[in-house]
Image (cartoon, grey):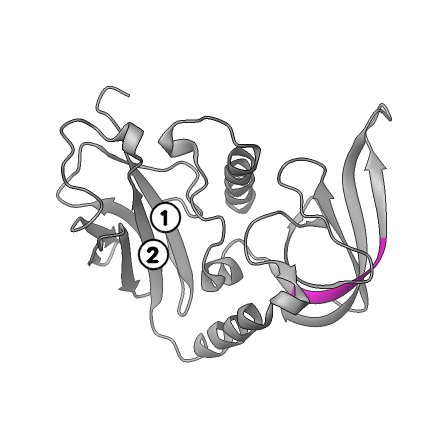
Amino acid sequence: MRKLNVIVRRLVAFLLFATGFAVPAHGFLLQPQPRVCTEVFNNEPVVFVGRVTDERVRLSDDGEFWEAFIYRLDVQEVFVGQLNGKVEVITQNDSARRNLDVGESYLLFAWEIDGALHIFGGGNSSKLSKAEETIHEIRRVLSSRKTATTGSIRGHVYIVPFNIPERYEQGPGGITFVAKSATGQFLGVTDEGGWFQIEVPPGEYRVFPEPPQPYLKARDISYNDPEHVIINNGTCAEVGFFAQRRDE
């Protein structure tokens, strides 16, 4: 269930971003393209290269509209997961869809939902012709995990001008964040762009600012939930926070 919830958060985030809704600062997409390490090791994706050989549509129950696109691919290389020969992937016909072209080869990150593999827009999926750097990074993180003794939590403080609290003068830089587990805590400090990174041993963590920042709130569409971050050797997570007025 937790895996599905994370995927749903990601889907909602992409929908908000792709449809261009005028939403509050905490409604914008956090990681339209998360680190390769984050996407490879979170939520148990299947990561592979395949060539699209067929496309068909699935109609809604009433037959009124195209509900989803279903693609059949010849599997060429698998990085994460188990696939052989041919595979089908589904993308819903909505703003989070990822359309593929028959005859093209793709690097895809897919997730199993209700027994079928689903693909989404955003993230590190792309045409194979544009995926050389991403594939290099996939190989690197998979190889480095074999000897890694820590993992990485990256985060970002988002401050959008129209939502900055009147008395919030901290800005995105110089804020200390704590990653706390049952066995210890580790610190990171945001740079001028609002980014921080904390190297931690394997465990389950809660990530929060310290001392408390009354105007900073966790983004509910973070790639990972700041209240529940699981790290294994060599894996990564990404969380987000935003500046919010006290009365919101």
Question: What type of secondary structure mainly makes up the magenta span?
Answer: strand
Q: Are marks 1 and 2 in contact (CB under 8 Å)?
A: yes
Measured as percent of width and height from the top left, residue 154 is found at: 34, 56
Tell whether 75 sits left or right of 144.
Answer: right
Which residue occupies 50% across, 38% down?
13
Identify the image quadrant of residue 81: bottom right
What is the magenta range? 48-54
Measured as percent of width and height from the top left, residue 157 is found at: 29, 45
Q: CA distance from mark 1 to mark 2?
A: 6 Å
Q: Which mark is residue 191?
A: none
Q: Is 166 included in the stretch rendered in magenta?
A: no
Residue extending furthest toward the top: 247
Q: For label 2, count other residues whose C-alpha is less than 10 Å away and answer few (under 14), some (14-19) or many (20+).
A: some
Is residue 114 depicted above or below 195 in this figure?
above
Measured as percent of width and height from the top left, residue 120 is found at: 63, 47
Is residue 82 depicted above or below 177 in this figure?
below
Measured as percent of width and height from the top left, residue 226 is found at: 34, 45
Q: Earlier in the sequence, mark 1 or mark 2?
A: 2
- Residue denoted by label 2: 154
- Residue denoted by label 1: 239
Is residue 211 depicted above or below 73 in this figure?
above
